[in-house]
Image (cartoon, rainbow, N blue to C red):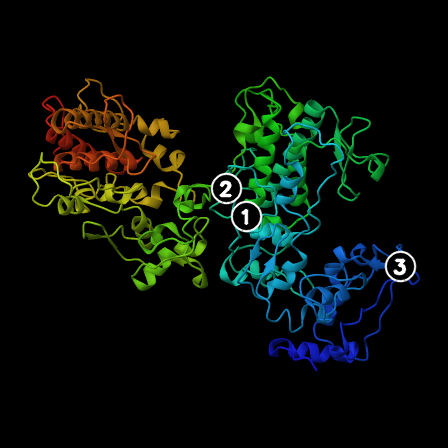
Amino acid sequence: MRRIATPIGVLVLAAWAIFAAFDAGPPPTLGTATAQDAPASLDYDHVEIPFFTDWIASGHADLNSESFVHWQGDDPPLVPERCATCHSSAGHADFLGLDGSAFGSVDQPAEAGVLQCTTCHNEVNATRTEITMPSGAVVTGLGSEVSCMTCHQGRASGLSVAEAVEGFEPDEVMADQGFINIHYAASAATNLGSDGMGGFQYEGQIYDGRFEHVESANTCQSCHDPHSLEIKVESCASCHRGVETIDDVRDIRMRGSAVDYDGDGNTRTGIATEIDNLRYLLMDALQAYATDVIGAPIVYDSSAYPYWFGDTNGDGMSSPDEANFGNQYRSWTPRLLQAAYNYQAVYKDPGGYAHNPKYQIQLLHDSIMDLASAMGEGSMAIERPASTDATLAQASYDHSDTLALLPALDTSMLDLIHRNDAGHFDVTSGAWRHWDEDGAVPARCSTCHSADGLPFVAEHGVQIEQEIAGGMKCTTCHVAEDDFDMIAMEDVTFPSGATLTFGTDGDNLCATCHQGRASKVSVDARIGDVDDDVISDALGFINIHYAPSAATIMGGDAMGGYEYAGKTYVGTWGHDDYDVAATCTSCHSAHSGTVNVAGNCADCHDGVATVDDIRMLREYVGDYDGDGVETGTYYEIANLTDMVYEAMQAYSRDVIGTTVVYDSHAYPYFFADENDDGEADGRYATWTPRLMRAAYNYQYASKDYGGYVHNGQYMIQLLHDTLEDLGVDVSNLDRPDEPF
């Protein structure tokens, strides 16, 4: 007798009363539906089977489901090998090798039959940890969800489409090419995202990988009852307050997804609605492209194979006369096929908004953009109401005919829809993708550039290598098992060695990653006793890193900038000691990072409605850049920053003999201009202490994009003193020596 793994033994033993000799071969079909017999009516009153009531009411046990009766009319009425793995219990046993055959393939047609206990509960599935997706990608490290993912992975992938269109021009009609269908309920393909490559992924774009839910809801069975298949809505409510029904689940929208993906001006609808609206827009784009570019209108019918048909009457709607196999669409171009495949992949996974919403949004967005690129300006213009002061959210937004409306309008849906999240959750940004080729985030970077690094440091006080992530998770900053309270962090130690606090755990967490990675102490340690204008191989550029806003706020208390000897510097700026704007999260959304302009800023600063208005704010008198014009603090700092760069170039050219040039996007940022043509010729190598100090402060001012708000006085002091150290006459430049 075959050995059954202990965790499933009780269930299988109970099932033996029906399934008889399990050791005699593959499990027999249960309630087989054939062409000769109507679906059977079964009587199980004489035996108790675990979870029987849940199972018998599920789709997996539905004797009348198309999934199991589709082949009744065939002769013989057997499920072919290509379908048997998932549409026949006997076929699944063949796939697993329970009949003595090789694992991983079905060797012969199988009798139709609903899924049984032993379809999933057997000694092979008990030890499986990986699956192979249609793309060929092997996904490892799986647990009990491996059984679900075997049949809910689809039967095609983006690579299937790529192979079909290879060698054709994007808008060339491919003779004899039919639609490529991912199949139904390919939820595993959605969940795995780019790790499984289920969707057609456009070249040059980055896509989310597997969707990582919280640990307690990260498998199929943790969200779905494995026997009834129903969603465990009550488990959703443990994190998502107010969720009681499936409709409530559709209304969920994580705070990190504060982007207007569908362009309707509303960022408060559930993420499911955003996906639906993008899908409507994609259908509009598909039909417009088929008509305007190919000249062969297309319609879609979700319940009629092969789904896409010729629009013979040109009304844009599928009719019974059109939705038949003989009228299947036959004018596929690569561009149309790619987008239609993605449309179907999203449509046929109705739970995609929970399985991996960002992956679906990315597929839909890129499909829309690609189709629109072939149709030109105004192809996705929208209709606005007559009122000139109406907002987009109030505008007429007719998904059924979006592309045909007012094509002369400058406002295009392409300008309104969005693909990527804010920085903390933007899977495409270098902050998360930089280590893809390395396979892991190194310890020195893991605190801020992995999903699990920050909580690990908070708990253990040490950095370790972490897995690559597609952005933050809730548990990056919150304690999941404790009602999502903030991870405790009483204070922050800055690179200078100073230990400071914002007074709240959340803001201290922000400061942990927005403090920079260097300080005056770092620069002085590198310089040592080298004289100011001496070139030394021991010197080199030191980078404070990106967005060191916490260091700026703390000013001279944190010593984030290079503070020159004999000068005094302002300390922590409390925004006039107003609690409403004294910390990170009092001005920025903790999740999107956006500034609450209309709220906090406008409360004190009259007429402020946008970030541009904030840049014009000027609360204190002083001509810091010496241009005789009193502009906003932002512009004073911007001008001073430009002046520092000019002074650095003059100093490097006249004193060192090699002009330095800067590129904000290319590491290590400072390069040598050997022939003074303004172009970089290689990494800058002839550093002096004076140039090092200036370069450090220049980079600091450049990389704290909100320095004018975080602590404008401190930033001005640093730049002023840098100019003076480089030999610039600063007699006409005011320096804010006293606190504002």
Q: Which mark is residue 53?
A: none
**87 lies left or right of 726:** right
Q: Are marks 2 and 1 in contact (CB under 8 Å)?
A: yes
**159 lies left or right of 722:** right
Q: Please give the residue where the numbered disc 2 appears in the rendered image.
A: 206
N-terminal label among 3 and 2: 3
Q: Please give the residue where the numbered disc 3 appears in the rendered image.
A: 76
| Amino acid at circle 1 | Ser
**431 lies left or right of 374:** left
* Label 1 crowd bin: few (<14), some (14–19), many (20+), radius 10 Å: many
Q: Which image quarter is the N terminus in? A: bottom right
Q: Is residue 456 visible?
A: yes
Q: Is residue 523 above or below residue 329?
A: below
Q: CA distance from mark 3 to mark 2?
A: 47 Å
Closer-to-camera residue (169/256) = 169
**Viewer-side label of 3, 2:** 3
Q: Is residue 606 visible?
A: no
Element marked by disc 2 = loop
**Viewer-side label of 1, 3:** 3
Q: CA distance from mark 1 to mark 3?
A: 40 Å
Q: Please give the residue where the numbered disc 1 appears in the rendered image.
A: 194
Q: Is residue 509 above or below residue 220?
A: above
Q: CA distance from mark 2 to mark 1?
A: 8 Å
Closer-to-camera residue (355/338) = 338
Q: Are marks 1 and 3 in contact (CB under 8 Å)?
A: no
The residue positioned 52% from the left and 22% from the top of the image is: 389
| Amino acid at circle 2 | Ile
Closer-to-camera residue (350/490) = 350
N-terminal label among 1 and 3: 3
Element marked by disc 1 = helix
Closer-to-camera residue (91/397) = 91
**543 lies left or right of 487:** left
